[in-house]
Image (cartoon, helix red, strand yellow):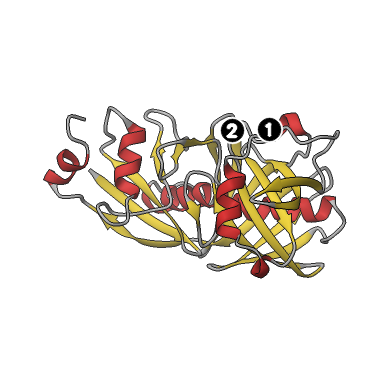
Amino acid sequence: MRLWKAHALGNDYLVLAGPLPTGDLPRLAVALCDRHRGPGADGLLVPVPGVACRVRIFNPDGSEAETSGNGIRIFARFLYEEHQVPDTFDVSVGDRVVACAVRGGDVEASMGRASFRPEQVPCLLPGPEALDVPLAVEGRTLTCTAVGLGNPHCVVFGAFEALPWHDIGRALERHPCFPHRTNVQFARITNRSRVEIRIWERGAGVTQASGSSACAVAAAGVRTGRLDPVVSVRSPGGVVRVRVDPGFDLHLAGPVSPVGEFFPHPGWLEAALPGG
């Protein structure tokens, strides 16, 4: 087994660079993403055999993600370095085709159109659009905006330093209002073009950065009148740039840093996945 690893502002992914294993990919993702007994990562990227530039994305808990801004950008960098694709090309994930461009150390990705309609997130929040909706969680009532980007997001604007946001994020991920669970972002606006966020990622927990989370915050901020259409989004890992076009088409750009390639010990897989 050969693995290729990179991070996007500390949000790290492993790519199964080959040969591709058969069998239980969710269990393999759990084992590989384990930071104590495995290589460790925030997710696993699995190229689809026989289909150029198509990828499946697995979270550290083994669940499969519909999309990931940083995961797609890391996979794009992998393809550029390992398979000599041109500097602009498409990556397919789920039912989406994402236009990508490698610009030196940065990778840009067109992340599709954001939706705030509850059935498209999906969520059970009231209204034709789930904008600034009160939601009870962990003994508090928070004001939440739900965003669908192919995967679900719940954005909470305010001063996150005063909140036990780890606990709230964990509770919101599995709140009954989100039937497929949700990613959670806590966002503090600096000015109309800058926002700082903390992230609780579905299936992963706290992460240093998240591309789709940055997009969700930018889209929610523009839709609720808090932010301008071009936004710098700072997470603990660093800054990405998001452009929100009319109609809420989103464009994400930021650095991707290769870490290296890894060859797990022959006995590791047998120990990590007994009987698998």
Q: Is residue 33 visible from the viewing direction of this image?
A: yes
- Quadrant where the N terminus sits is top left
* Helix, strand or loop status at disc 1: loop
Q: In the image, residue 110 lies at what x, y percent?
A: 65, 47
Residue at the image position 33 percent from the left and 54 percent from the top: 40
165 w.r.t. 118: above or below:
below
Image quadrant holding the C terminus, namely: top left
Please report whichever mark, 1 or 2, sits nearer to the chain's N-terminal start. 1
Residue sitting at 72 percent across and 43 percent down? 147
Q: Looking at the image, do the residues carrying marks 1 and 2 touch, with CB atoms under 8 Å apart? A: yes
Look at the numbered disc 2 and give the secondary structure of its residue: loop
The answer to whether residue 113 of the structure is visible from this angle is: no
Residue underneath mark 1:
122
Q: Amino acid at mark 2?
A: His
Q: Does 68 sit left or right of 46 as displayed?
A: right
Name the residue carrying label 2.
180
View extreme (bottom): residue: 190
Q: x%, y% of residue 7?
A: 44, 59
**Residue that lies at the very extreme toward the front in this rendered image:** 139
- Amino acid type assigned to the residue bearing label 1 in the image: Pro
> Which image quadrant is residue 156 in?
bottom right
- Residue 109 at x, y percent in the picture: 61, 50
* In the image: residue 113, left or right of residue 201: right
